[in-house]
Image (cartoon, coloured by chain):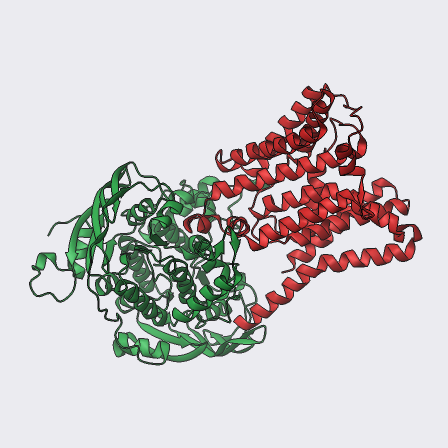
Amino acid sequence: MQIVMKNINKSFGGVQVLHNAGLAIADSEIHALVGENGAGKSTLMKILTGVYTRDSGQILVNGEEVEYTHPKQAEAQGIVFIYQELNVMFDLTVEENMFLGKEIKKQFGILDKNAMKSEAKKVLDRLGVEIPVDCPMSELSVGQQQMVEIAKALMVDAKVIIMDEPTAALTPKETEVLFKVMRSLKEKGVSIVYISHRMEEIFELCDRITVLRDGEFIGSKDIGDTDMNDLVKMMIGRDIGERFPKRNCTQGEVVMSVKNFTKNGVFNNVSFSVKAGEVLGVAGLMGAGRTEIMQSIFGNLPYDSGSLEIMGKPVHIHSPEQAKKLGIGFITEDRKTEGLMLEETIKKNVALTNLSSISKNGVLDKDKENNLVDKAIKELSIRCFGPSHICSNLSGGNQQKVVFAKWIYINPKVLILDEPTRGVDIGAKKEIYTIINKLAESGVAIIMVSSELPEVLGMSDRVMVVHEGRVGGFLDSGEIKNIVPQKQATQENVMILATGGTL
Amino acid sequence: MNTKTLNKSKLDTIIQDFGSLIALIFLLIVLSVVSPDFRNINNLLSLLKQSSVNGLIAFGMTGVILTGGIDLSVGSVLALTSVFCAGMIRSGVTPLLAMVGALAMGMVFGLISGLLVAKGRLQPFIATLITMTVYRGLTMIFSNGKPISQLGNDAFLNGIGKGSFLNIPVPVWILAIVFLLFYFVLNKTVFGRKVYAVGSNEKAAKLAGINISLTKIWVYVVSGFTAAFAGLILLSRLGSAQPTIGAGYELDAIAAVALGGTSMNGGRGKIYGTLIGVLIIAVLNNGLNILNVSSYYQDVVKGLVILLAVLSDRKR
C-alpha cells in the first residue's frame, strides 16, 4: 500500500504542532519516522489513522484522497497503529484480547471459543512465535504482549502497520524476534512505519527514513545515503558534537560496597563497590535483575541476605526513607509512574524529596522552597514556564531533569540511575550526560543501569554485567592502554557476559 | 501547545476553585430573596451551627480522601465516642475529663482504621466498612441500644454545643478554628505536602523517601478525632447520647468533600472547597425546610446538586 501525506497542518487549541509535515510510504518497506520528542511523529500517525483530523493538507492512499475520522475506518483499509502503551486487557487471555470486539459467534450470540482459539493460534504461528492462547496477558512478557498486538493487526489483514517505539521495553532477544517478524511481514508486502529513538536499530532494520522537526517535514532519505551524524543534525537542526561529553574526574574512596546481596530466585550473591566520583555502569539483558538489585539496595524491595556498607559502616536499609537519610538517591526507570507526581507542578515535585531542608519544625519555608526550585530550573536548564509548570506538560527530557533535581539537592553520596535516558531525545540526552558528569566531578558515586550499550560504554568508568541475577563480570572502560583485552568494556565483551558466557 | 494547556488548566482551576463558591452565593441570594425567614440573621447563625457537625467530619474526611482513601466509619465513631462519653459522665467521671477521653478514643478508633489500611493493606473502603460495622455494634452493646441521658448540668458539656461567645455560637467558633488548623496543616506544613503526595502518586512518594504508612495512619487518626469532636457537639446539643446517631453521616461528609472539588482519587483538593461544600449542604437543608419542601424532595434536590457539582468537576 502506498501512502502519501503532504503539507499536513494541525493545531491544538491555537498552537500549531504540525506545520507542513508529511511522509511517503512505499509498498513493502520499513520506514523509520524519527525526530525529537514533541516533533510530531505520533500526532502525524494519529492523523493518518483517524484518531485526530487534520486542519489542512492531503492524504493519499494508493493515489486516492482519504480522510479518516475514526481509527476503525483506517483499520478497515488495513492501516493499523500499535501504540507505545499497549492496548492490552491484562486479565483477559491472549485469545480474548485478539478477538476483542470481533468475536466469532455461533447461534444466539454464543461465543465460538474453539474457532477463535484455533484462529488465534494460526495467526501467532504465522508470526513464528510460541504463545499459549489460553494464557492471561498479564503473565506474558512485554515482548510477547507486543507480538499479540501485532497478531491482532494481522487479523484485520493490515497492509500498513505503525509501531511507536516497540522496542523500548523489549529484551535484545525479543527485539531480535520482533525484527525477524517485521522483515518477514515486509516480504509479504506489508509496509511498516517504525517510530524509534534508537539509531542503531534504525540503521539495522529500515529501508528509508523520514525526519520531522518541530512538526515540520525535514527530509526523507534512503538509509544507505545517510549516517548517524547526518540524521542527528537533521533532527535537532545543529551539530551536537560529541555524543558523550568528557568528564574530568578523580576517583576517591569507596563510598558504598555491597556484599553477597541475595534475593532468592531474583538475584544471587551480588557484590560490588563504587567509589566517589566513579560512574559504575550496570549492563545486562532486560529481566536480568538489575532493577531489582538497585531497588533492594534502596530499600524499596526486601532482600533475603547480604550486607551493605556506606563509607565503611555497615547499614541495614528497609525503606527508601532510610536510604535517603544515608545519602542514597534513586532515579527510577519509570519516571511517569514512580518518579514524578505528573499532575503536579515542578515545584511540588522538586520539594518532595527536600521537605526537611525547606522547612523548620515541620512548617514549610516558602522562600527556601522557591529558591531551591529556581536554582534547580536554572542549573539543570529545565525548559518550562516557571516553577508552577505542570510536569505532564513537559517533554520527556525535561521531566527527567525534574527527577534529577529531586535528588541532586539532597547532596547524595551515592546516586543510583535506572535507565536515566529512556524515552529522552538526543539533545536532552546529552544534557543529562553532562549533569551526570558534573555530579561525578563533585564526588558523587554513580551507579548507572542502562540497556543502551553505547550509553553504558560511553559514560562508565567500569561496567558491571549482570546475567540472570548474578554478576557476570566487571569490565574496564577508558583508553587505559594496559587493560587486557578480556577486561575491556567493548560491546562484544558486554554481550558475552550478559548472555552467560565467559571471557 | 504548552502555554495553552497551562492557561487552560489555570482557567479550569479557577472554575473549579470558585464554581462551588458561586453556587453557594447563588443559593444564598435566591433563598434570601424568596424567603424573609431565611435571611434572618438568627436563622443564618443557626444554619452555621447546624453545619458544624458535618463540617468537622468533612474536614477529617478531606484529609483521608486527599491520600486516596475514604473513611466510612466516622458516623459509628461519633456514636461510639459519644455513648462512651455519656456513660463515663453517668458513672461519675468529670465531664471535661470524659470529653477529653472521648476525643482520645476517637483517635484510637481512627488509628485502628489507619492500621488496617496502611499495615493490613486492606482497601480503605473495606477497612472502614469493617470498622464502621464493628463500632456500631460496640455502641449498641455498650448502651444496650438505649439512649444515655441525664448528664447533669456541666458548663463545658453545655457550652460546647449550646453556648455562645461574642454572640456567635460556640460550635461555629470550633468549626472556624478547626478549619484554620486544617488550612494551615494542609498548605503550610511538611505533613500537608506528604498527604497530597501520597494521594497524587503513592509509588513516587514512597521512592522519594516518604513514610507512606505513617502519613496514611495519621489522616485516619485525625478523622477519628474530628468525628469524636462532632459527637461531643451533638451530645451537648441533644443532652443525651443516642446509639443510633450518626448513621449516614459519612455520606453527608463525602458529599461535602465532593462538592468542594476534591478528587476521590486523592492528591487534588482544597479544604476551603470542603467548607463551601458543607455550607451548600447546610443552606440547602435549611432553605428547603423553610420553604416547606417535603424531606423526600429535599434528598432528590441534594442529590441533583451533587451531580451538578461533580459534572462540572469532570469537565476538565
Q: Which residue of the protein is positioned furthest toward the right in this rendering?
A: B36
Quarter of the rendering occupied by the N terminus of chain A? bottom left
Reply above or below: A107 against A209.
above
Question: In red, which chain?
Answer: B
* Drawn side of residue A47 relative to residue A274, left or right: right
* Drawn side of residue B32 relative to residue A156, left or right: right
* Residue A224 locus on image (x, y percent): 25, 76
Closer to the camera in the image, A146 or A476 = A476
* Residue A484 locus on image (x, y percent): 7, 59
* Residue A232 locus on image (x, y percent): 32, 75
* Drawn side of residue B90 relative to residue A83, left or right: right
- The answer to whether residue A346 is seen in the rendering is no
* Residue A334 locus on image (x, y percent): 40, 55
- The answer to whether residue A485 is seen in the rendering is yes
Reply above or below: A28 against A148.
below
Closer to the camera in the image, A347 or A344 = A347
Query: Residue at 61% of width from left, 32% of height from top?
Result: B104
Rendering quarter of residue A480: bottom left
- What is chain A's hue in the picture? green
* Drawn side of residue B67 relative to residue A314, left or right: right
Query: Residue at 80% of width from left, 23% of height from top?
Result: B150
Reply above or below: A222 against A452.
below
| Count of numbered badges drawn on the protein | 0
Closer to the camera in the image, B35 or B152 = B152
Query: Residue at 34% of width from left, 60% of height from top?
Result: A420
Closer to the camera in the image, A300 or A171 = A300
Query: Residue at 78% of width from left, 37% of height from top?
Result: B159
